[in-house]
């Protein structure tokens, strides 16, 4: 099937849903041959918020200097934990999560 045969099969061109327009085969060929070539391209714009979010997600939330200090204290045997602080944090965590056993 060539393009000419396909064009002859077109019997009606709709300009809008309520206004059908009939065209002759010669008119259809003229419209198609004069149509500019269509080029499709994708593009996206990234907002400032998206850029900032991406940057924030790429940064580690682990403070390595604090981790190193705790590791040194543990290895030196001088790391001390307050039992009251541990208890307070456990109670706060269980209260926050709504767990009641």
Image: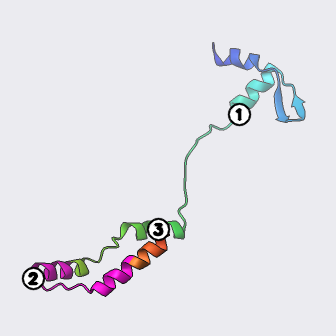
- The x and y percentages for residue 27 are 80, 25
Looking at the rendered image, the quarter that the N terminus falls into is top right
> Which of 24/60 is in front?
60
Disc on the earlier residue, 3 or 1? 1
Between the residue at mark 3 and the residue at mark 1, the CA separation in whole angstroms equals 72 Å
Secondary structure under tag 1 reads helix
Identify whether 54 is placed above or below 77: above
Classify 53 as above or below 79.
Answer: above
State the residue lying farthest toward the left.
Answer: 76
Q: Earlier in the sequence, mark 3 or mark 2?
A: 2
Q: Which residue is mark 3?
A: 99
Q: Residue at x 81, y 20 (%)?
A: 11
Q: Are marks 2 and 1 in contact (CB under 8 Å)?
A: no
Question: Please, what secondary structure does the residue beneath circle 2 have?
Answer: helix
Q: CA distance from mark 3 to mark 2?
A: 37 Å
Viewer-nearest residue: 91 or 57:
91
> Is 77 inside the magenta-drawn segment?
yes
Where residue 10 appears, x then y in whole percent?
77, 21
Dot 3, crowdedness within 10 Å: few (<14), some or many (≥20)?
few
| Picture residue at 32% right of the left edge, 85% below the top | 85
Q: Which mark sits nearer the N-terminus, 2 or 1?
A: 1
Give the extent of the magenta segment: 68-90
Q: Position of residue 3 (x, y in %)?
A: 65, 19
Q: Secondary structure at mark 3?
A: loop
Image side of residue 41 versus residue 73, left or right: right
| Residue that badge 1 annotates | 34
Instruction: Judge by depth and name the residue closer to the eye, 91 or 23.
Output: 91
The dot on residue 43 is none
Question: Magenta stretch mostly in which secondary structure?
Answer: helix
* In the image, residue 84 lies in the stretch drawn in magenta: yes
Residue placed under numbered mark 2 in the picture: 76
Q: Is residue 15 above or below residue 101?
A: above
């Amino acid at each position: 099937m060539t393009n000419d045969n396909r064009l002859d099969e077109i019997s009606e061109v709709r300009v809008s849903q309520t206004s059908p327009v009939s065209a002759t085969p010669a008119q259809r060929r003229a419209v198609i041959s004069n149509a500019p070539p269509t080029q499709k391209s994708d593009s996206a714009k990234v907002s400032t918020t998206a850029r900032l979010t991406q940057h924030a997600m790429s940064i580690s939330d682990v403070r390595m200097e604090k981790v190193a200090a705790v590791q040194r204290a543990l290895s030196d045997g001088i790391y001390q934990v307050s039992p009251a602080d541990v208890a307070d944090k456990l109670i706060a965590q269980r209260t926050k999560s709504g767990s009641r056993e």
